[in-house]
Amino acid sequence: MSGANGSFLTGFVLLGFSDHPRLEAALFVFVLFFYLLTLLGNLAILAVSRLDPRLHTPMYFFLSNLSLLDLCFASSLAPQTLVNLRGPAKTISYGGCVVQLYVSLALGSTECVLLAVMALDRYVAVCRPLHYVVIMSPRVCQRLASASWLSGLANSLIHATLTLRLPLCGQRRLDHFICEVPALLKLACVDTTVNEAVLFVVSVLFLVIPPALILISYGLITRAVLRVRSAEARHKAFGTCSSHLTVVVIFYGTVIYMYLQPSDSSAQDQGKFVSLFYTTVTPTLNPLIYTLRNKDVKGALRRRLSGSPC
């Protein structure tokens, strides 16, 4: 990490939305509002998934992991964003940048894999219902969740470490509102071909392969559901899977745009707003989508709020 030179002592200036000073007050309210919703929604999902015995199933086990991911991911970015939007001092210490980079990269990568695992769970539930309890046993679910978390951690350790070792030659002005790999690569004063190659490989591993597996899973699910004669059963199956598919589209759509956008300045400016949506709104939408479109979760919330065990 010594390659950061003077930035190790002075930290970074996060330019963020300095080009839009009139928007910063509105963006502060926007980020604060959605951060509070993220805390409330994901804590509610975690609470009902743990307290209601009806939700002690593989689907809600993975949903709890997703809520924990979103809760930690938003908390790793939103407080610093709020501080920088509040006043003219838009800085982050070098240590704070390092922690933010490692944590957000690990959590974001983990979510990429976890969403694919959740698609696998839905595939087994719809296409192999008689063997579902055996295939998705508690031990298997725990191993799949652990593999998701460990893959995100491994990606973060490798990718962030390679980025932080680059010499910055005293450059401290980061053209973003968070510390992320593409923005840090632009500050490097040496050839970043190796880092860009690693970024490409990581993008394929986490942004191409999991969505491809999800599409295959849902293609098989759709074929299986269309064979079901009962309209009620088809509606239930599609309803269960549509919530997950909605989360997948929103998550991967914003992330792929962030990492595959062109390098011109106008696209970078748009990329900041897309990043703001991805880091602020997406963690809020996940619990809302699963709550509003899921009768089991809504029923569990009503039972908890009313104090009724039935």
Image (spheres, helix red, strand yellow):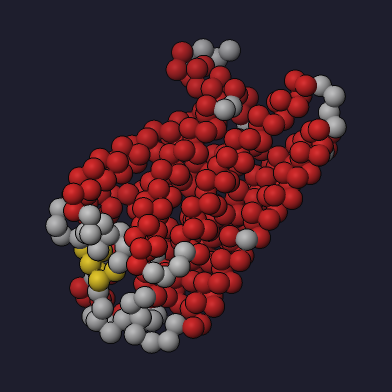
| Residue 40 placement, left or right of 96 | right
Q: Is residue 81 above or below residue 190?
A: above
Q: Is residue 242 above or below residue 292?
A: below
Q: Which corner quadrant of the image does residue 112 belong to?
A: bottom right
Residue 116's spot in the image, x, y percent? 65, 50
Q: Examine the rendering and report whether any part of residue 29 can be seen.
A: yes
In front here: 297 or 260? Answer: 260
Q: Examine the rendering and report whether any part of residue 3 can be seen.
A: no
In front here: 267 or 274? Answer: 267
Residue 155's spot in the image, x, y percent? 53, 66
> Which residue shows up at 45% across the image and 17% down it?
305
Q: Which corner quadrant of the image does residue 49 belong to?
A: top right
> Which residue shows up at 45% across the image and 67% down it?
262
Which quadrant does the C terminus fall into?
A: top right
Q: Is residue 43 above or below residue 204?
A: above
Q: Which corner quadrant of the image does residue 227 belong to?
A: top right
| Residue 12 placement, left or right of 264 | left
Residue 142's spot in the image, x, y percent? 64, 47
In front here: 258 or 73? Answer: 258
Which quadrant does the N terminus fall into?
A: bottom left
